[in-house]
Image (cartoon, grey):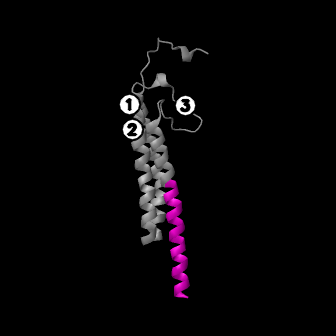
């Protein structure tokens, strides 16, 4: 009975590891994608940051890259800790999906504001007129 229980626990740990590393790899990949882009990286699905909105696209994308890669790190850590204790995995994963996501949004807003081109109320760009 104990051997079966340990085997099930090990299978649970392996599943947690795979899922967590898949999520981490996805977010790490988004970071790599952001770094290679020649146009500004957007954050929300369906939204698009226009080139005219950002004053330094290369550094804007670089900071997006760092943001996503740091976020992915917590998923890799959760996967490794899942082998030690599934409770650690559950706690870190819950924090990633709640507080981590909230911090990700705040980080992106800070990056966007840092590189956003401030437009005068009286300047109308061609993209604004449609």
Q: CA distance from mark 3 to mark 2?
A: 17 Å
Q: Which residues are magenta?
A: 1-23
Q: Are the residues tagged 1 and 3 within 8 Å (C-beta)? A: no
Q: Quadrant of the C terminus?
A: top right
Of marks 3 and 2, which one's residue comes earlier in the chain? 3
Q: Nearer the viewer, residue 105 or 48?
A: 48
| Residue 17 against residue 129 in the figure, above or below | below
- Disc 3 designates what residue? 48
Q: Residue at x 55, y 17 (%)?
A: 128
Could you tell me which residue is drawn at 44 percent across and 58 percent down?
76
Query: Can you identify the residue that label 2 sits on?
Result: 63
Residue in the foreground of this view, choosing between 65 and 117? 65
Q: Residues within 10 Å of mark 2 (few under 14, many from 20)?
A: some
Q: Is residue 101 above or below residue 111?
A: below
Image side of residue 20 versus residue 114, left or right: right
Residue 114 bears which disc, if any? 1
Residue at the far right: name it.
Answer: 130
Apparent side of residue 43 relative to residue 60 in the rendered image (left or right)? right
Mark in front: 1 vs 3: 3
């Amino acid at each position: 009975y104990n051997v079966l229980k340990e085997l099930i626990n090990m299978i649970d740990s392996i599943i947690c590891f795979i899922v967590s590393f898949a999520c981490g790899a996805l977010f790490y990949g988004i970071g790599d994608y952001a770094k290679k882009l020649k146009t500004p990286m957007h954050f929300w699905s369906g939204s698009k940051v226009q080139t005219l909105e950002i004053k330094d696209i290369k550094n804007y994308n670089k900071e997006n890259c760092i943001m996503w890669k740091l976020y992915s790190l917590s998923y890799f850590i959760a996967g490794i800790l899942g082998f030690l204790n599934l409770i650690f995995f559950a706690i870190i994963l819950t924090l990633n999906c709640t507080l981590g996501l909230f911090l990700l949004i705040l980080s992106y807003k800070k990056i966007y504001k840092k590189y956003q081109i401030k437009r005068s109320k009286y300047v109308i760009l061609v993209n604004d007129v449609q």
